[in-house]
Amino acid sequence: MVNVQRLFGREVHYAVPLYQRPYVWNEPDQWRPLWDDLQPLAEMVANGQQGRAHFMGASVQEPIAVPSGATETRRVIDGQQRLTTLQMLLKAFRDVAFARGHAPHAKAIDKLLRNDDPLIADAPKRLKLWPTRTDQQDYQHVMDAACPAELLQALGKPGAPYPLKNHTIANAYLFFHKEIDAWLTAEQADLASRVTGLYGAIRDQLRLVVIDLDEKDDAQAIFETLNARGAPLLSADLVKNSLLGRLPPDKADEAYRKYWQAFDSDGAFWRELIGRGHAQRARIETFLQHALTLLTGEIVSPGHLYNAYLDYAETPAAGTALDVLARFKRLGDIYRRLLQPQTDERLARFFYRLHTLDVVTAWPFILALYDRHEDRPDLVRDVLIDLESYLVRRMVCRLSTRGYGTVFAALTGVVTAGQDDVVAAVRGALLEGDAEVDRMPSDTEFEHAWVTNKLYENLTRPRLRFLLEAVEEALRTGFAEETAPPRNLTIEHVMPQGWREHWPLAGGATAEHRDRTVQTIGNLTLLTRRFNPYQSNRPWVDGKTPESGKRANLDAHTVLVMNRGLCDRADWTENDIEERATQLFELAKATWPLPSQPNLQTFDTAQPHQPRSHAASATSGSET
């Protein structure tokens, strides 16, 4: 076990290989606990007591042969997160000590940060540690700056608040600088004794176990063994390590820059946690799952990504390491681009609805489609519209999603098979399913579910909202100022769920039938968050103050086409609800037609048009 003095006190250069992941430690999980443990140690040292050593874990290192007389160089196989954190802690302490008038301590700390051999010609080797390529620029900025203000200026973010986005190494420095300065200058604190105490605690009491490899040890195998199970290292990092480790050193650096660096440099995107609860994962892990499912033709489990990659890499289809890197790069570029706002309005709606549906198993198929046919946008658009019809119809009919992995694996095979007419081939595959797990609902089944299902209770609010948004979009003509409604509207029951206060039963209607009917889509619309509670349980027409009923309020305030049509109805009963649901179905059927049917141009908002008669009547009782 070695302390910081033995680790950094001699002339030594620690090089982090390019295959290592970027620096990812953060304040709540690592920096804050380290600082909280370090303070009492520093206070004990300041008071002349011998504190208990703080163990920071292990570092696996591989000595690198250098010419006689050159600075000792060691490759960091594991433990780069710890070493980098120690360097940021030391640099922050050095700058605070110097700024607070303790130059001797600042100079002593400098010897733990930099090598002072005048014969060193390579600038990075003058530093004790040199991180992986993605972090090198920010690391150099930290080492060159004398204070946080200088660092922010070098990063092009003068005056920016902590934490900075996508600058994890800089954030480590800024965190420790702030905490050290506050602790050293706390009220009634003896600044000199605290500087001495903190210096002694860091230098002598922080310790690591250093494991040296020799020429007989397989550095890559040890790296994978240490990190493949239960560690926060991502499967994507192991994949990168494996691929680059299969290349000669002179080729690995170029391959990293060309094919993988974008995954590391844009950490704010690729390492962002997505999903909910136990399923939450870094986005790059989700992408890797989709990519491997596409490449292997088999459903890949999130918990077996690295093993799936290893199995794939051994197949003839994988080709060389460069071939695999190029495939991941290509698919990664597509995936990232598709998660950005789309310029094509119809595709933008597709990806918005796909995200709301949360059908992640469709992504290998979508990646295959774009990979093969991105240069044929009309073909891609047609296939995705068919796919949306399939998903929405099944959702409304409440059909199971459990078989979607198998469904989309088969569809991916259709795309990669090189069919001449991909649109027809995919449509045929969508239509041939005849089981509950894979069938495309007919118009009859779709209509029955649309009209009678209690969709308000059966669907999540976002999913129900996009159904109503689609109805509104279908009603708007190409001459409208906006072709789509706002995405922040709320769902309103026209006849309220609390109907008993102002909506007496009439014409033989029963309470049981009404309670069911109010939850169907014929009784639902969209309102702003402010307008929705204002409508509440009001009557449709208020006999005492007609201007305050629901119909009058809609007439006075709404701008949605579907709501303007509602204002034409003199009454609002169960019959009106069922009639409107049937009329709205015509819009739904046109928006999500059976793939064997053409998409009806009547509702294509790309061209100016007038709605068909059933569209106009969908919200107006006066024309029925």
Image: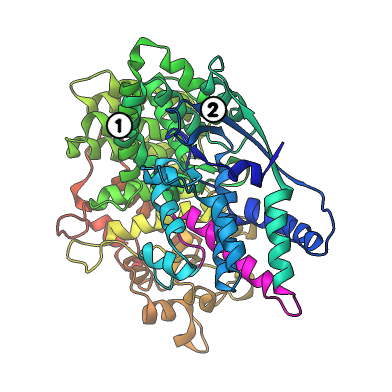
Give the residue at x 37% y 82%: 556
Pinpoint residue 240: horizontal percent, then vertical percent.
Answer: 43, 30
Q: Nearer the viewer, residue 418 or 162?
A: 162
Q: Which residue is at the far right? A: 49
Relative vertical location of residue 156 with respect to residue 315 in this rendering, above or below: below
Amino acid at the residue labelled 2: Glu
Pinpoint residue 225: horizontal percent, then vertical percent.
Answer: 60, 24
Part of the protein shown in magenta: 162-191
Q: Is residue 510 magenta?
A: no
Q: Which residue is at the far top? A: 316
Q: Nearer the viewer, residue 482 or 104?
A: 104
Image quarter (top left, top right, bottom left or bottom right) of the C terminus = bottom left
Amino acid at the residue labelled 1: Glu
- In the picture of the structure, the residue carrying the numbered disc 2 is 62
Helix, strand or loop for disc 2: strand
Give the residue at x 35% y 21%: 248
- In the picture of the structure, the residue carrying the numbered disc 1 is 254
Disc on the earlier residue, 1 or 2: 2
Marks 1 & 2, CB-CB < 8 Å contact: no
Spatial CA distance of label 1 from label 2 is: 22 Å
Relative vertical location of residue 545 with respect to residue 36 in this rendering, above or below: below
Q: Can the viewer see residue 27 in this picture? A: yes
Q: In this rendering, which labeled residue sits more in front, label 1 or label 2?
A: 2
Question: What secondary structure prevails in the magenta region?
Answer: helix
Q: Within 10 angstroms of label 2, few (less than 14), some, or many (20 or more) residues?
A: many
Q: Quadrant of residue 312?
A: top left
Relative vertical location of residue 96 with respect to residue 371 in this rendering, above or below: below
Pinpoint residue 351: horizontal percent, then vertical percent.
Answer: 35, 47
Q: Is residue 171 magenta?
A: yes
Pinpoint residue 462: horizontal percent, then vertical percent.
Answer: 48, 55
| Colour setup of the view | rainbow
Helix, strand or loop for disc 1: helix
